[in-house]
Image (cartoon, rainbow, N blue to C red):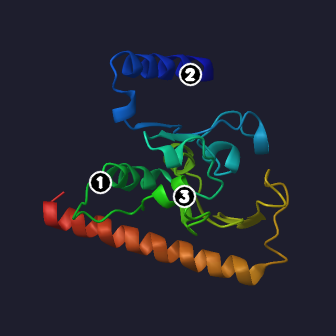
Amino acid sequence: EIAFVDSQVGRLMTWLETNQLLEKTIVVVMGDHGESLGDHGEGTHGFFVYESVLHVPLLIRAPYDAMRGRKVADVVRSVDVQPTVLDLLGIRSTETFEGQSLTSLMTGARSELGLEAYAEAVYPRFHFGWSDLRTLRAGRYKYIEAPRPELYDLDTDPHETTNILPQRRALAGQMRAHLRALEARLTAGRDAVGLETGV
């Protein structure tokens, strides 16, 4: 799959270059999910919210010298792609976005934005009647809201093998509160849109 995607992106880049459009085009390539491949006992993806499934590639090629060859280490999210592309194009939108532009990371003006990343797995609930899973990543820490909540320090434990929640209950409580506040805000926004559109 990776080789196939690479060949298709290569075809696109070759076409843009052949047609003298490469230096006028922003290209974004992003994975939608990883594969557990046995990590935490999961063979594929969809059940859990560990990094083997959530940490996906995001490549942005923009025709600006300040952004060439830069690797961003900070946490970024899929919701940041649209505001980033609009910012790169110089388009100012009156729309409100959940994400924010990453251009300051891409130019090196900033090394981190302090973004909180949300993810969920609802497949277990819809297909088996099990609990869904929700997670919040803030900096080096990741909280998983589950029947048995989990907390990981991804700097020291990138494979999420040691649940540090028993030792860091206060931090877990803060992250749980942030997660619930985020969900309440997103739910309120969704309900408001449904009321306005009659959906």
Q: Residue at x 60, y 65 (%)?
A: 112
Is any part of residue 5 visible from this angle?
yes
Residue 193 rendering spot, x and y as whole percentages: 22, 64
Q: Secondary structure at mark 1?
A: loop
Cα separation between marks 3 and 2: 25 Å
Residue farthest toward the bottom in the current orientation of the protein: 170
Cα separation between marks 2 and 1: 29 Å
Type of amino acid at the residue the image marks with label 2? Asp
Type of amino acid at the residue the image marks with label 3? Leu
Q: Tell me which numbered mark, 1 or 3, is placed earlier along the sequence.
A: 1
- Residue that carries the numbered disc 3 in the rendered image: 105
Front residue of 70/181: it is: 70
Residue 169 rendering spot, x and y as whole percentages: 76, 80
Type of amino acid at the residue the image marks with label 1? Gly
Q: Tell me which numbered mark, 2 or 1, is placed earlier along the sequence.
A: 2
- Residue that carries the numbered disc 1 in the rendered image: 90
Q: Secondary structure at mark 3?
A: helix
Quadrant placement of the N terminus: top right
Residue 138 rendering spot, x and y as whole percentages: 63, 68
182 lies left or right of 195:
right
User: Taking 162 as reference, is 23 above or below it?
Assistant: above
Disc nearest the viewer among 2 and 1: 1
Residue 168 rendering spot, x and y as whole percentages: 79, 78
Q: Residue at x 85, y 77 (%)?
A: 167
Is any part of residue 102 visible from this angle?
no
